[in-house]
Image: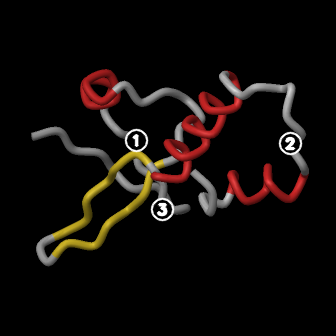
Amino acid sequence: MKTSTMTVKGQVTVPKELRDAFGWKVGDEVAFLREKDGVKIVRAERQRRGRAIVERLKGASWNRKLTTDRLMAMTRGEER
């Protein structure tokens, strides 16, 4: 088991072995999930959705009109 000490600001360092195992990089967002016996740390869903939007836009046909409203709906996950 790896351990880390919490700072006065509530910060902890995720051990390098675990960051490498999960592919976590500087700037990645994580989410904290309350479990009955502790806290689970996972990669934040928001980032995954953002990557999916970028991938969809990479393949988008720019011959059709992509309005700001449609782009915002895609960003919020309202349009697939």
Q: Which mark is residue 66?
A: 2
Q: Residue at x 69, y 23 (%)?
A: 58
Mark 1, secondary structure of its residue? loop
Q: Nearer the viewer, mark 2 or mark 1?
A: 2
Mark 3, secondary structure of its residue? loop
* Residue 17 coordinates in the image, percent (x, y): 25, 24
Question: Which three-letter amino acid code belongs to the residue tagged 2?
Answer: Leu
The numbered mark, 2 or 1, whose residue comes first in the sequence reads 1
Q: Residue furthest bottom?
A: 36
Q: Which residue is mark 3?
A: 10
Q: Residue at x 84, y 26 (%)?
A: 62
Camera-nearest residue between 31 and 70 = 70
Q: Which residue is mark 1?
A: 13
Question: Which three-letter amino acid code belongs to the residue tagged 1?
Answer: Thr
Camera-nearest residue between 56 and 45 = 56
The numbered mark, 2 or 3, whose residue comes first in the sequence reads 3
Q: Residue at x 40, y 41 (%)?
A: 13
Rounded to the nearest whole Å, what is the CA distance between mark 2 and mark 3?
43 Å
Rounded to the nearest whole Å, what is the CA distance between mark 1 and mark 3?
10 Å
Mark 2, secondary structure of its residue? loop
